Image: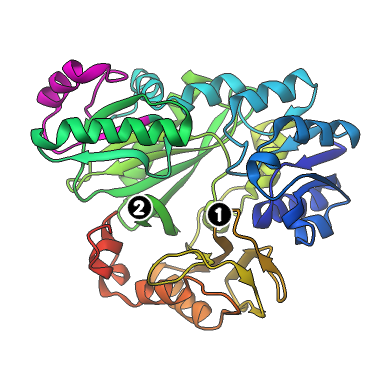
Amino acid sequence: MFQKILVANRGEIALRVICACKELGISTVAVYSEADRNSLHVRFADEAVCIGPPRSSESYLNIPQVISAAEITNVDAIHPGYGFLSENANFAKVCEASEITFIGPTAEVIEMMGEKDRARREVKAAGLPTIPGSDGIVEGEEQLGKEAARIGYPLILKAVAGGGGRGMRVVRNQGELLSAYQTARSEAQQAFGNPDVYAERFLEHPRHIEFQVLGDQHGKIIHLGERECSIQRRHQKLIEESPSPGMDAKRRKELGAKVVRALEKIGYTNAGTVEFLMDQDGSLYFIEMNTRIQVEHPVTELVTGVDLIKAQIRIAAGERLEDAVGEMQFSGHAIECRINAEDPDTFVPSAGRITTFQAPGGTGVRVDSAAYADAVIPPYYDSMIAKLIVKGRDRAEAVGRMKRALEMFVIEGIKTSIPLHRRILADADFAAGKIDTHFIERLLGTNGK
């Protein structure tokens, strides 16, 4: 087992990894920017190293600074959390070259799954269903026209290096095709430094469903059930739950088995998430794979009893899956609300000082956060400040428990998304499980604006 791990992240996920390490008896090193000097992950780590100014490009994304911090503190491994460097294949390679274990999949697999068009080809060859689309990058306007005629409308253009909705454009007719292609390429270049896009059929009202997986270094892969992630705005998830109200036991078993077989062929290791869209007829199609721990991992932890962060660490240390995971048993229903520091009506980020932070408690309630009263939410990073997670015997109890917990969650001094979450939970369609990726647009009457 590792003796010391550097946590290459900030906020609640950094604190979450530190907690797992403490329970495993592993020393921790926090890295932080100047804006995070008073953060809880800095306070509770055994050591802490400042790696630069507030901007993430000069601190949390600065690979030489992170590696230097790891070397001067003599760590065995680095846990990247999610975001920042977690899916950076070059960072994984640098860790390997520096003889520091990267807690995640191999650089080769990160690279493969990071190229969206290549990932589609690989998983299709491995047996997973994919949405009809181009067989690779769309090279120029002539090929674009041919692919559009073959796929049909509506279609969607996606950045091959994309994520979070950037570099994506829905095209509903031929008249929109060229301008959408140019806009998607421009966005992709600005966001990812790579203008390449591919095309696929656009599903009008799909559910977003993902499977959590774990793989050890001895060829064993398991899935830990699915999560429903359809409540989202502009491809940013707001609420997640497990199991999905849109899945049944038969479909779960069949697709879960396909996911496991596909990742065995690919040679996947550590934690990952295979994401699908479910059409209105119940058909499921692969869209992408995230080669890291997810923000929404707690809902899986609550319904399986598996500590995914500990499992990541144990697997990276070479343990077999059965030892890293322990006994797994599916039970109950879990829901997570991402509490963001933003205006609940306009979604404008709300940086500033928290004057009151009173988290809810009670049976079946968990709060993952690095926020506290008098903490300052800086304007430089993602707006999420807490994750409120509940578990019930069934979905109805979980929904009722989440309503109660949201009512008792008091954050003052900044605006938060709590009022929006309460509105979502009160909606009759949400209560009935009648949701898809356009739920928020219908609720707010915004049509995505």
Asked if one can make out residue 8 in the rendered structure from this viewpoint, the answer is yes
**Quick one: label 2, few (<14), some, or many (20+) residues within 10 Å?**
some
Quadrant location, the N terminus: top right
Name the residue beneath numbered marker 2: 234
Q: Is residue 56 left or right of residue 25?
A: left
Q: Which residue is located at x 29 percent, y 29 percent?
A: 129
Which kind of residue does numbered mark 1 sit on? Asp
How many numbered circles does the render carry?
2
Rendered position, 21 above or below 441: above
Quadrant location, the C terminus: bottom left
- Residue 10 % position (x, y): 69, 51
Q: Which residue is located at x 62 percent, y 50 percent?
A: 306
Q: Is residue 342 left or right of residue 215?
A: left
Looking at marks 1 and 2 on the same chain, the residue that comes earlier in the sequence is marked by 2
Choose between 433 and 397: the one closer to the eye: 433
Q: Which residue is located at x 42 percent, y 44 percent?
A: 164
Rendered position, 85 above or below 37: above
Asked if one can make out residue 131 in the rendered structure from this viewpoint, the answer is no
The quarter of the displayed image where residue 186 is located: top left
- Residue 295 % position (x, y): 54, 51
Choose between 61 and 149: the one closer to the eye: 61
Name the residue beneath numbered marker 1: 382
Check if residue 343 falls in the magenta segment: no
Which kind of residue does numbered mark 2 sit on? Arg
Check if residue 149 falls in the magenta segment: yes
Disc 1 secondary structure class: loop
Rendered position, 209 above or below 240: above
**Quick one: label 1, few (<14), some, or many (20+) residues within 10 Å?**
few
Choose between 410 and 190: the one closer to the eye: 190
The quarter of the displayed image where residue 156 is located: top left
User: Magenta region: which residues?
Assistant: 132-159
